[in-house]
Each structure stands twice: as structure tokens, then as C-alpha cells.
Amino acid sequence: MKKQVTQLMIALMGLSVAPMVFAQTAPGTGKVTFNGQLTDDTCVINAGDEDQTVTLPTVSAKSLPTAGAAYGSKAFTISVSQCPSTLSKVAAHFETTNMDPKTGNAINLAVATPAQNVEVQLLDRNGTMVGDTPLLLGNTGAYVSITNQAATMTYAGQYYATAPATAGNVTAVVRYTLAYQ
């Protein structure tokens, strides 16, 4: 019986794969190839930096009167140590969970009295330090050098309006992974 079920599953999988193969060759289609590399070497995220809470300043909703307006930034750091000598640079790669696909920002997840038309935008503060650069979720911040097996990366979060903002609570969660050069 187990052999028959396995053969049936293989046969069904063969039926469902055939149309997909045909669709990939049809006009108006394309493909995406992903390349990457995994390493055995890693730094250790310092205690207290792996799960942080950053409290953005309380600002007036009138500070965010139109789509694209940003206000109320607050910096935070991610520090690492015990980095192997095989690594020379590190950065945080911010994952796409809870992301608004139109803006690349973190959506407002507040449940109790949520502010409307507000997201949290990340900023990369490791670049030239001449103004902060928006850092869209799914991207990696500027790499910082590892010195004496340690490094500190600095980022910020700020309110970002998708339309005129309304008063209320804002809660956003972003996840990150360490990336290396």
C-alpha cells in the first residue's frame, strides 16, 4: 500500500510539474536565479542587542502630513564580539517580514488604537554619517570593519507616512541576520 501511495504521489507531482515547465517557456515569463554563500564563521551578537525595544519619540500626527513625510528618528546599535579572524566586515541584513511591499518599510502592527497611515522606516547610519540613508527591509546595511574581533553597527528607526497620519499607537517588528564580507 505504501508503495502504491508513493507511486500515486509521484504521478500526481509529475502532472502538476508539467504545466509549470511549459509556462516558463511561454512569452511574457521570466525567471529569478538566487546566488549566495553560507559561512561557518560568525560573530556573537552581544547580550541585550539580539532582542531590543526602541522607543521612538512621541510626536504630533501633524508632523506627518503627507505621504513620504518622515519624522521622529531614534538610533540603536547592534554590537558583536568574538568574531573569527576570517571575517573582516559585518552588517545587519534586515528581513522582509512585516514589510509593506510598496515602501519597503515595517508595517504598523499596533493592535490597540493603531495610528493610521504610519510605518517605521529604517535608516542606515554607518555610511558617510552625512545624513541617514533609508534602508529598505530585505537589504543589508553598510558594512563596518571588525576590529579586535568586535564591531558596532548603528541604525535608526523613524515614523514614515503613507498618507496623512492619524494619532494612535505604533508598533513595528523587524528581524535581522548578520551578513559578512
Image: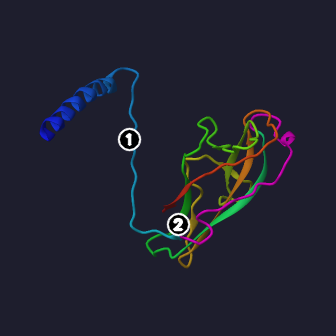
Q: x, y percentage for residue 38?
A: 39, 59
Where does the image place residue 34, in percent across and percent down from the top left?
40, 44
Q: Which residues are magenta?
A: 45-68
- Please state the horizontal and vertical placement of residue 148, each as a whole percent of the image: 55, 79
Decide: few, some or many residues near mark 1? Use Cα within 10 Å; few <14, some 14-19, many ≥20: few
Where is residue 90, by image quadrant? bottom right
Residue 64 is left or right of residue 81, and the answer is right
Of helix, strand and loop, which one carries label 1? Answer: loop
* Image quadrant where residue 62 sits: top right
Instruction: Verify whether residue 73 appears in magenta.
Output: no
Residue that mark 1 sits on = 33
Front in this rendered view, residue 14 or 150: 14
Up-down relation of residue 69 to residue 91 (above or below):
above
For the residue marked with disc 1, what is the amino acid? Thr
Give the dominant element type of the magenta stretch: helix, strand or loop.
Answer: loop
Q: Secondary structure at mark 2?
A: strand
Relative to 161, 15 lies left or right: left
Q: Please identify the quadrant where the N terminus is shown.
A: top left
Q: How is the image coloured?
A: rainbow
- Which residue in the structure is indicated by mark 2? 89
Between the residue at mark 2 and the residue at mark 1, the CA separation in whole angstroms equals: 26 Å
Direction top: furthest residue: 27
Residue at 50% x, 74% y is: 83
| Residue 156 sits in quarter | bottom right
Please report whichever mark, 2 or 1, sits nearer to the chain's N-terminal start.
1
Q: Residue at x 23, y 26 (%)?
A: 15
